[in-house]
């Protein structure tokens, strides 16, 4: 077992915390209601999802050409394009761009890809001040925490807890209302925007035909920060490319309805390069990040995970997430899609256990706006783990014993206590410390039938 597996198992104990369970289930329940309402905006949502599925998969098949076309157009528009092999490469590029300049701080947007490259810790190590553009991230920064969910980043925090963090950090009154806290955050963010000369963001999509960078948000702070900074750096996965502006007509409404339940995000921007009229940003750089995506592309089944648009819907409906929460994973990408991507991006050896973190109920497949067959991909991961014989040797030996028992009528009819003992050995030894083991039937079906009981 890897260190990650041990930590993960320990973290999963949170599932027995009633208060945590209620908070998460209340919040995910709210999302499900909004999401159900948003489907009313479509005449045929399944048709739209099918279109998005075809579009995203076609883009992946033509990735090389689309990326090169994007680069050509973006450079023509006055921007710069850099290609990063991995997170370290991306960090070095960012450092190269900001180190030479006398800057006071960096604004960053609320994008998971910036967590993927470890931007926050990297800038802290370099003693560069990092300012948040969004309200949820500002709260997390005050709390010293990382996002709990990619869309509802602080769904695990109550108002009282947030009051506590703001009181400790900014001396705000303990009984401040949400409105007062949001006003305070907006004021701080505005001041930070005036100080920071660099803005680092992700991008929802890249447009190959125009060299456009698409940002979709609800607060409008990201585009404001970009237009106030001298330098705008975009870090984006190579898989986020789509052919054309017209494709946004399909993808943006699906992204909004499946992430927040709104028919459309409030602020949607397409930036095609630096400013041409001596306003900000004076310079713009797009860092195209690979970081294991090429590995995923090589596997014909798993490659479909790269069509993800990071709406977070599969996470919000996942029964595993609703029990273990977002912090148990300790990985950048969590929930069903994280279960698929992380083992191949971060190493199958260390993250093989993730392949088992799924009940294969299929809720994620039902909700996914780009129709990724997530459960099939998780099964593929299990196949890869089995193929490489990575796993718990004791568990495998016990599975073989169980298979032997299931094939033998005599053993299937053995005493109930013996069956209980075997099950207890087969499952994790801690499994029944918090919950009662289900009772086994006193007699097998075969015994009942032979004894005339049925
Ligand atoms: S896998 Fe589908 S549902 Fe899950 S985050 Fe990606 S696009 Fe959304």
Image (tube, rainbow, N blue to C red):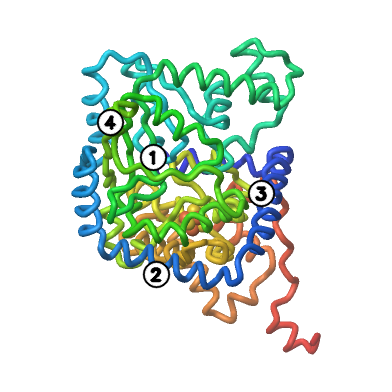
The yes-or-no answer for disc 1 within 8 Å of ligand 1 is no
Please report the residue visible at 67 percent of the width from the left and 60 percent of the height from the top: 36
Describe the element under mark 3 as helix, strand or loop.
helix
In the image, which disc is placed on residue 220? none
Q: Comparing marks 3 and 2, which lies closer to the viewer?
A: 2
User: What residue is disc 2 on?
Assistant: 54
Q: Secondary structure at mark 1?
A: loop
Residue occupied by mark 4: 91
Please tell me how crowded label 1 is: few (under 14), some (14-19), or many (20+) other residues with Cα within 10 Å.
Answer: many
| Residue 12, percent from left and from top | 58, 43
On screen, residue 389 above or below 282: below
What is the CA distance from the residue labelled 2 to the residue labelled 1? 24 Å
Q: Residue at x 63, y 40 (%)?
A: 14
Q: CA distance from mark 4 to mark 2?
A: 33 Å
How many neighbours does mark 3 have within 10 angstroms: few (below 14), some (14-19), or many (20 or more)? many
Q: Earlier in the sequence, mark 4 or mark 2?
A: 2
Q: Earlier in the sequence, mark 3 or mark 2?
A: 3
Task: Work out how far the residue at label 3 is from the one at label 1, CA to CA, in angstroms.
Answer: 25 Å
Q: Which one is in front, 118 or 83?
A: 83
Q: Nearer the viewer, mark 4 or mark 2?
A: 2
Figure check: 265 above or below 200:
below
Drawn side of residue 304 relative to residue 365, left or right: left
Quadrant assignment for the C terminus: bottom right
- Residue designated by label 3: 28
Pick whichever of labels 2 and 1 is earlier in the sequence: 2
Q: Nearer the viewer, mark 3 or mark 1?
A: 1
Q: Dot 2: what SS? A: helix
Structural distance between the alpha carbons of marks 3 and 4: 34 Å
Horizontal arrangement in the rendering, residue 194 relative to residue 9 (left or right): left
Tell me which numbered mark, 1 or 4, is placed earlier along the sequence.
4
Residue that badge 1 annotates:
202
């Amino acid at each position: 077992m890897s260190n990650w597996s041990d930590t993960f198992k320990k973290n999963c104990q949170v599932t027995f915390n009633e208060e945590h369970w209620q908070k998460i289930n209340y919040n995910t329940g709210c999302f499900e209601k909004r999401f159900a309402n948003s489907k009313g905006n479509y005449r045929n949502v399944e048709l739209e999802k099918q279109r998005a599925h075809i579009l995203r998969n076609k883009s992946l098949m033509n990735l090389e050409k689309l990326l090169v076309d994007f680069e050509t157009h973006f450079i023509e528009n006055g921007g710069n394009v850099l290609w990063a092999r991995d997170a370290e490469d991306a960090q070095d590029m960012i450092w190269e761009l900001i180190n030479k300049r006398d800057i006071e701080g960096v604004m960053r947007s609320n994008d998971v890809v910036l967590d993927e490259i470890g931007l926050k810790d990297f800038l802290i190590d370099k003693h560069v001040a990092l300012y948040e553009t969004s309200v949820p991230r500002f709260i997390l920064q005050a709390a010293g925490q990382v996002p709990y969910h990619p869309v509802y980043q602080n769904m695990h925090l109550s108002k009282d807890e947030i009051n506590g963090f703001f009181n400790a950090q900014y001396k705000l009154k303990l009984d401040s209302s949400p409105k007062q806290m949001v006003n305070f955050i907006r004021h701080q963010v505005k001041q930070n925007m005036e100080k920071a000369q660099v803005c680092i963001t992700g991008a929802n999509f890249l447009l190959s035909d125009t060299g456009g960078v698409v940002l979709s948000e609800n607060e409008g702070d990201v585009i404001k920060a970009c237009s106030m900074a001298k330098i705008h750096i975009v870090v984006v996965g190579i898989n986020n490319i789509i052919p054309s502006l017209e494709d946004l007509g399909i993808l943006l409404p699906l992204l909004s309805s499946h992430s927040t339940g709104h028919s459309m995000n409030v602020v949607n921007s397409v930036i095609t390069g630096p400013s041409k009229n001596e306003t900000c940003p004076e310079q713009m750089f797009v860092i195209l990040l690979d970081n294991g995506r090429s590995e995923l592309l090589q596997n014909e089944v798993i490659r479909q995970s790269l069509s993800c648009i990071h709406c977070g819907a599969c996470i919000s409906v996942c029964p595993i997430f609703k029990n273990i929460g977002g912090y148990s994973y300790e990985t950048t990408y969590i929930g069903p899609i994280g279960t698929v991507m992380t083992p191949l991006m971060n190493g199958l050896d260390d993250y093989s256990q993730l392949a088992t973190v799924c009940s294969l109920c299929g809720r994620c497949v039902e909700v996914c706006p780009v129709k990724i067959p997530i459960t099939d991909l998780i099964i593929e991961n299990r196949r890869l783990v089995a193929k490489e014989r990575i796993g718990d040797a004791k568990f495998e030996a016990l599975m073989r014993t169980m298979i032997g028992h299931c094939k033998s009528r005599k053993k299937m009819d053995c005493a109930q206590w013996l069956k209980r003992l075997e099950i207890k050995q087969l499952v994790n030894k801690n499994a029944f410390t918090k919950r009662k083991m289900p009772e086994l039937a006193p007699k097998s079906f075969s015994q009942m039938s032979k004894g005339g009981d049925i």
